[in-house]
Image (tube, grey):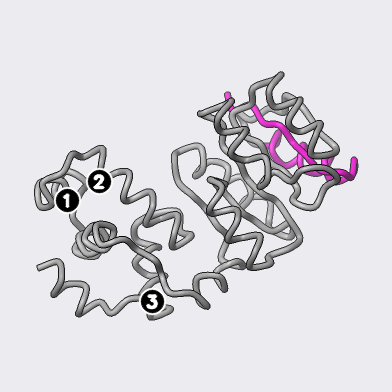
Amino acid sequence: MCRLLLADDHQVVRDGMKMIVESREGFTTVGEAADGAELLEKALTVKPDVILSDLKMPGPSVIDSALKLKAALPDVKLIVLTAYDEQGDVSRAMQNQIDGYIMKDTPPDRILSTVEMVLNGFTCFQPQVEKLQETETLSFTPREKEVFACIVENYSNQEIAEKLFVSETTVKSHVRQVLKKTGQPNRSQAVLHVLKHNLIDFNRLKENAG
């Protein structure tokens, strides 16, 4: 059972969110909040699996509260559901460990699939906010570049670990960072995204990893 806390300063929006999430078997709403302060209070009380929150509410935003929430509830997943896709907000969301960022006009099935992907450990930033990555150079660390080169070659986590002489746990951590920085839910989409937007010189990447 996935337990969700819904936050928006408009009751009608919360009602709509509740109808969407509870249409999926195994999803249930355990609390609602109308502002940032109430979100923090309710989260610490009901300890949800997922917080699905509007961004522009009175009080501290879910992005502002993200690190505090993660510290108090290490397993909680945070998803922003908003009408805004401003670059600064998206960047802060990534920096503050937000797990998902989707627009309010997203079809219900896509919202539910985003929740499911986030529950499975993926970071999912909707394509509508891809313009952030399109206007910035990907800031992969040298090790992340090596891991990404292996992803391009379709190596498994175990194979990457053996190639780079690191643990599989370390590889998984780097893969999560690659997905987070590309804003994609899985390896294949990360590679396609980087290729589509010409964010990395693939030939040079392979030479450096060789």
Q: Could you tell me the amino acid type at mark 1?
A: Ile
Identify which residue is drawn at 66% across, 60% down.
89
Measured in 3D between alpha carbons, the distance from the residue under mark 1 to the one under mark 3, in whole angstroms, is: 22 Å
Q: Can you identify the residue that label 3 sits on? A: 199
Question: Residue 53: x, y in percent?
Answer: 72, 43
Which image quarter: residue 47? top right
Magenta residues, as a range? Answer: 1-23
Label 1 neighbour load within 10 Å: few <14, some 14-19, many 20+:
many
Helix, strand or loop status at disc 2: helix
Q: Earlier in the sequence, mark 1 or mark 3?
A: 1
Q: Can you identify the residue that label 2 sits on? A: 171
Q: Earlier in the sequence, mark 3 or mark 2?
A: 2
Residue 54 lies, with reference to residue 146, above or below; the image says above
Report whether 32 appears left or right of 108: right
Question: Residue 12: x, y in percent?
Answer: 89, 44
Q: Are marks 3 and 2 in contact (CB under 8 Å)?
A: no
